[in-house]
Every structure is written in structure tokens, then in C-alpha cells.
Image (cartoon, rainbow, N blue to C red):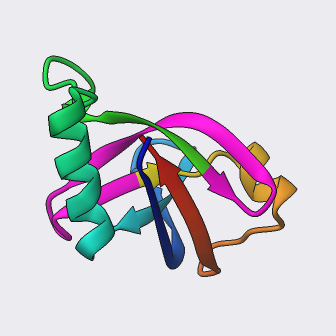
Amino acid sequence: MEDFTVTTPLWRWQSATAPAAWFFVTIAGEAGDGIRLAAISGQWLDGRRGFGSAKVRAAIGGTSWSTSVFPHKESGGWLLPVKAAVRKAESLVEGDEVTVTVSL
């Protein structure tokens, strides 16, 4: 199992038409490259569905969960969705600097 840790801001995306907002952290740079290489070599990358996502285990503070990361064209890295239960458990709000560890 490979681990990648980054500190990056929590940001919100909201569709103009949908009422719900999604929260993400962007994993770019060396960690993003490492995830891409590990995902490809380990066959975790599923190009058939899920936008080329890779299944991961994520941890912020004392909270960990299973999720997927998604390729992010703008940064060349990955987007990690941060669900409401995690944001609540770790008292996170939009703009907070978040240290996250992603394990493949």
C-alpha cells in the first residue's frame, strides 16, 4: 500500500442548477503524480467507468473513509471528495487548509 500526504485548501463546487454543493481537496504535484503511477501500476485505475477514478482510503485527522479520487484536468492532479460526515467530524469549512493522507 502506498500513502500520499498533502496539505491543501478545502473548496466547494456547486452547479448553477443543482441545490447541493460538493466539497473537494485537490491533490496535485508530486503526490498527484505518485497516485497516478501507483494507480496505473496497481490496476486501481478504472477507465471504463467513474471518469478514470482510483479507489483510495483517505484520512483527515482522526477520520478515515473509503472513496475514490478523480482526475483533475486543470491541476493535472486528483480531486478527493470530502463528505459532510468527515467535514463535521473534523470541524472543517470551505477554505480551511486540510492535511489529508490518501492510501492506495
Visible residue check, residue 68: yes
- Residue range highlighted in magenta: 59-79
Quarter of the image for the N terminus: give it: top left
Res 85 → quadrant: top right
Residue lying at the far front in this picture: please name it.
1
Q: Residue at x 61, y 74 (%)?
A: 98
Q: Is residue 38 above or below residue 27?
A: above
Residue 44 in the figure: left or right of residue 59: left
Picture quadrant where residue 33 is located: bottom left
Magenta span includes 9: no
User: For this view, does 61 lie left or right of residue 94?
Assistant: right
Quadrant the C terminus occupies: top left
Q: Position of residue 73 (x, y in %)?
A: 14, 59
Q: Please tell me how many numbered marks the rendered image carries.
A: 0
Residue 75 vs residue 7, the one in the foreground: 7
- Across and down, in percent, residue 71 comes to 22, 49
Q: Position of residue 36 (x, y in %)?
A: 20, 50
Front-most of residues 38 and 47:
38
Magenta: predominant secondary structure element? strand
Q: Indicate yes or no whether the magenta region holds residue 66.
A: yes
Camera sees residue 28: no
Residue lying farthest to the top in this orientation:
48
> Residue visible at 83% across and 55% down?
88
Q: Provide residue 99's location: percent of width, then percent of height.
A: 60, 73
Instruction: Left or right? Give the position of 60 relative to 11.
Output: right
Q: Residue at x 81, y 62 (%)?
A: 90
